[in-house]
Image (tube, rainbow, N blue to C red):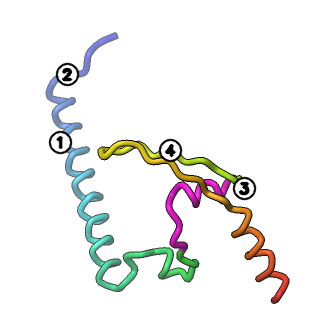
Amino acid sequence: MNPIPYEVASSSKQKLSLLYAFFAWNAFGFVIYSIYKGKADWAVYHGLPKDDLTPAQQYAKLLGMQKVKVIRIGKGGTEEYEIDNREQSNNEENLLEAE
Protein backbone atom coordinates (compact mmCIF):
# COMPACT_ATOMS: atom_id res chain seq x y z
CA MET A 1 0.00 0.00 0.00
CA ASN A 2 1.54 3.28 -1.11
CA PRO A 3 0.89 6.54 0.74
CA ILE A 4 -0.65 9.49 -1.10
CA PRO A 5 1.92 12.07 -2.17
CA TYR A 6 1.92 15.19 0.00
CA GLU A 7 1.04 17.54 -2.88
CA VAL A 8 -2.04 15.50 -3.86
CA ALA A 9 -3.23 15.21 -0.26
CA SER A 10 -2.73 18.92 0.37
CA SER A 11 -4.59 19.87 -2.81
CA SER A 12 -7.50 17.53 -1.96
CA LYS A 13 -7.69 18.88 1.57
CA GLN A 14 -7.82 22.46 0.31
CA LYS A 15 -10.60 21.67 -2.19
CA LEU A 16 -12.65 19.81 0.42
CA SER A 17 -12.15 22.67 2.90
CA LEU A 18 -13.50 25.18 0.38
CA LEU A 19 -16.46 22.90 -0.40
CA TYR A 20 -17.23 22.52 3.32
CA ALA A 21 -16.99 26.29 3.87
CA PHE A 22 -19.38 26.90 0.96
CA PHE A 23 -22.03 24.51 2.31
CA ALA A 24 -21.61 25.75 5.89
CA TRP A 25 -22.06 29.37 4.78
CA ASN A 26 -25.22 28.46 2.83
CA ALA A 27 -26.64 26.54 5.80
CA PHE A 28 -25.94 29.53 8.06
CA GLY A 29 -27.67 31.82 5.57
CA PHE A 30 -30.69 29.52 5.44
CA VAL A 31 -31.01 29.56 9.24
CA ILE A 32 -30.81 33.36 9.36
CA TYR A 33 -33.37 33.63 6.54
CA SER A 34 -35.73 31.24 8.35
CA ILE A 35 -35.49 33.24 11.56
CA TYR A 36 -36.08 36.47 9.64
CA LYS A 37 -39.19 35.04 7.99
CA GLY A 38 -40.58 33.83 11.35
CA LYS A 39 -39.93 30.13 10.84
CA ALA A 40 -37.58 29.73 13.82
CA ASP A 41 -39.95 27.39 15.66
CA TRP A 42 -40.71 24.87 12.93
CA ALA A 43 -43.38 23.04 14.95
CA VAL A 44 -45.46 26.18 15.44
CA TYR A 45 -44.87 27.26 11.84
CA HIS A 46 -46.23 23.96 10.50
CA GLY A 47 -49.24 24.05 12.85
CA LEU A 48 -48.27 21.25 15.22
CA PRO A 49 -49.68 21.55 18.74
CA LYS A 50 -47.15 22.77 21.28
CA ASP A 51 -47.07 20.71 24.46
CA ASP A 52 -45.97 22.24 27.72
CA LEU A 53 -44.64 18.90 28.91
CA THR A 54 -41.18 18.16 30.22
CA PRO A 55 -38.98 15.82 28.16
CA ALA A 56 -39.61 13.04 30.70
CA GLN A 57 -43.37 13.47 30.34
CA GLN A 58 -43.14 13.49 26.55
CA TYR A 59 -41.01 10.32 26.52
CA ALA A 60 -43.35 8.51 28.92
CA LYS A 61 -46.31 9.51 26.77
CA LEU A 62 -44.50 8.32 23.63
CA LEU A 63 -43.82 4.92 25.20
CA GLY A 64 -47.41 4.67 26.43
CA MET A 65 -46.40 4.30 30.08
CA GLN A 66 -49.11 5.11 32.59
CA LYS A 67 -47.24 5.60 35.88
CA VAL A 68 -43.57 6.58 35.79
CA LYS A 69 -41.03 7.40 38.48
CA VAL A 70 -38.47 9.97 37.30
CA ILE A 71 -35.09 10.46 38.95
CA ARG A 72 -33.42 13.65 37.78
CA ILE A 73 -29.72 14.10 38.51
CA GLY A 74 -28.28 17.60 38.23
CA LYS A 75 -25.83 20.06 39.71
CA GLY A 76 -28.07 20.76 42.69
CA GLY A 77 -28.44 17.08 43.60
CA THR A 78 -31.13 14.57 42.77
CA GLU A 79 -34.85 15.09 42.40
CA GLU A 80 -37.52 12.39 42.32
CA TYR A 81 -41.10 12.73 41.13
CA GLU A 82 -43.80 10.62 39.58
CA ILE A 83 -45.71 11.12 36.35
CA ASP A 84 -49.25 9.77 36.13
CA ASN A 85 -50.44 9.64 32.54
CA ARG A 86 -53.66 7.83 33.40
CA GLU A 87 -55.42 11.14 34.09
CA GLN A 88 -54.18 12.66 30.83
CA SER A 89 -55.18 9.66 28.74
CA ASN A 90 -58.68 9.68 30.30
CA ASN A 91 -59.03 13.39 29.53
CA GLU A 92 -57.87 12.84 25.93
CA GLU A 93 -60.35 9.98 25.48
CA ASN A 94 -63.18 12.16 26.81
CA LEU A 95 -62.22 14.95 24.41
CA LEU A 96 -62.17 12.53 21.45
CA GLU A 97 -65.58 11.13 22.41
CA ALA A 98 -67.05 14.65 22.70
CA GLU A 99 -66.06 15.45 19.11
Judged by depth in the image, the label closer to the viewer, 4 or 1, is 4
- Give 64 or 83, whichever is nearer the viewer: 83
Give the SS element for disc 3. Answer: loop
Q: In this view, does 7 lie above or below 57?
A: above
Q: Mark 3 points at which residue?
A: 66
Using residue 47 as the reference point, say whether residue 26 is left or right of it.
left
Name the residue type under label 3. Gln
Q: Residue 71 carries which label?
A: 4
Comes first in the chain, label 4 or label 3? 3
Judged by depth in the image, the label closer to the viewer, 2 or 1, is 1
> Mark 2 packing: few (<14 Cα in 10 Å), some, or many (20+)?
few
Q: Mark 1 points at which residue?
A: 14
Name the residue type under label 4. Ile
- The spot of residue 96 in percent (x, y) is 80, 81
Residue 59 in magenta stretch: yes
* Residue occupying image coordinates x 23% and y 37%: 12
Residue 8 in magenta stretch: no
